Amino acid sequence: MRNGMLAEMLNVQLYAIYGIKFQLLPSFILTTKGNYMHKLIAIIFILILSVTSAASAEEKEDRHSCEICGMYIDQFHDTSSQLTLKSGEKFETCGVACMLRSINDKGGPDAFSSIVVHDWKGKVVIPAAEATYVIGSEKIPDMMPNIIAFKIREDAEAFRVKEGGEIINFTQGLMSISPMGMTMPTRIKTAVLSPQGSLAAGVGYMHMTMDTVKLGSNSVDPSEFVRRPGQITSPKKMTADSEMLMLNYSLTDNFSVGLTAANFQKRMESYKNSGAVTETTKNDGFGDLDLNFRYNLWKNAYYSKFFSLLAGMTLPTGEFKKEFINMPGMQLGTDAFSFTAGLLFSNRFKDFWFHYLASYTTMLENGDDYKFGDTTRFGAAVHYTPNYDIMLGLELDGAYAAKDRCLGQNMNSTGGFKSNLTGVVEWKFMTAMGGTFSVRGSGGVPIYEDLNHYAVGASEKAKLGGGYFVSSTVNFSRRFPLF
């Protein structure tokens, strides 16, 4: 069976179940021939969606799901709520946070004829508007921010003394909620950690093109650069495509572990003989594994400000080839471990999330006496969440890399500074399997580059910059209940 036919069959199956036309299987996965990593990611993606289809069909008959986050109500019964619109439509949420988001999204309390929630202590159903709530305690029974309802204010006060947090009423709760519980930047990390037991998985694709010769911060067209007296050779264009598999799991409410694996296809076009000949160099394969660890040092009671530590390392699973020592951008891996330390800060203001990053990565020397340059990175992002299903954002990131070293000598055409501006949009398109599925697209360009270069006789040894980058991912997230 051809890969295109397989994709079409799966999309038809999803259409039959959900009544929505899907075109979710990226063509890069199912149409590329002969690449094991492509096929592996395709299989994982197909399995996820196939299981989702079956699970969704089952939930419609047997299990109720939160209308906001998709989590199963029977697993979060003690915090669940039931809402009835004046039109007669009824639905449930896993907890108070999702209940408040649903209320805000559907026109406020006046749009409902009934809103009830479970009392945490007595386990009885009570009117949501009459309850007393504790926000920001040490206990997170469902979603963030953790808001727990009580029928009697004295019970809420006693809970607050034991578990921490602040006392709020129904109206304050409505004002404390953002449409989206948290947002995830594309090119930097967030300081916001999901509750213990939360799993996020994603399959993605990235394309990058560089097509401008950089002499410091000056940009030169490659066809003009190679015609300079004595130049003879010049890089013309570099492209990189990659398929990515991303996982993140929260071991505790304050500690999470993430992993990113990627498969690359890199192409470098170069001018030879003063531009008379164009030569193409290729390198395909699996890259280094990236592990990251985040630990939350502090968050406020309203879960609108977070300060976290970032630590990371790469495992040398990608191949380092001696033939590309003079073309380090073509390498698939470093053949050495790297270690990262950084600080993260995130805060919410109404419907906006702001994220900030500062980090430093040090590289170890590999067995071929080559050391990639240590890198200092910064990043900032602003995300707008008009409702729970949509996020629109702009992100700025930059990095200063030291020169690479080979056999103890600087590689003078490596390193320098580069900053990028990225636009991103995310859409939550489906709830199933006790969680949510979302699709994300992003695209960006370098906005300032100052890259190292040096003269070799009458010619220059320079790097490529400029161009653009785009990416797309399909993500699944769910919290597995622990009690």
Image (spheres, rainbow, N blue to C red):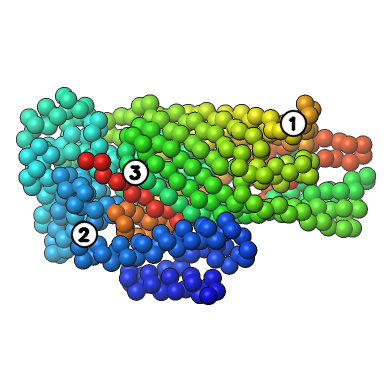
Q: Is residue 348 visible?
A: no
Q: Is residue 172 visible?
A: yes
Q: Does label 2 or label 1 sit earlier along the sequence?
A: 2
Q: Nearer the viewer, mark 2 or mark 1?
A: 1
Residue carrying label 1: 369
Q: Secondary structure at mark 2?
A: loop
Q: Quadrant of the C terminus?
A: top left
The answer to which image quadrant residue 325 occupies is top right
What mark, if any, has residue 85 been given in the picture? Answer: none
Crowd class of label 2 (few under 14; some 14 to 19; many from 20; radius 10 Å): some
Image position, residue 443 (x, y; %): 55, 52
Q: Are marks 2 and 1 in contact (CB under 8 Å)?
A: no
Task: Name the residue: 64% across, 34% down.
Answer: 336
Image position, residue 203 (x, y; %): 48, 54
Residue 13's place in the image compared with 110, above or below, is: below
Q: Amino acid at mark 1?
A: Asp
Crowd class of label 1 (few under 14; some 14 to 19; many from 20; radius 10 Å): few
Task: Name the residue: 68% across, 48% down.
Answer: 466
Residue carrying label 2: 63
Query: What is the C-alpha distance between the residues marked 2 and 1?
Result: 59 Å
**Depth check: 167 or 256 in front?**
256
Residue 263's place in the image compared with 122, above or below, is: below
Image position, residue 117 (x, y; %): 13, 47
Tell me if 237 is positioned left or right of 21 in this view. Answer: right
What mark, if any, has residue 198 been given in the picture? Answer: 3
| Residue at the farthest top position | 161
Q: Amino acid at mark 3?
A: Ser
Image position, residue 338 (x, y; %): 60, 32
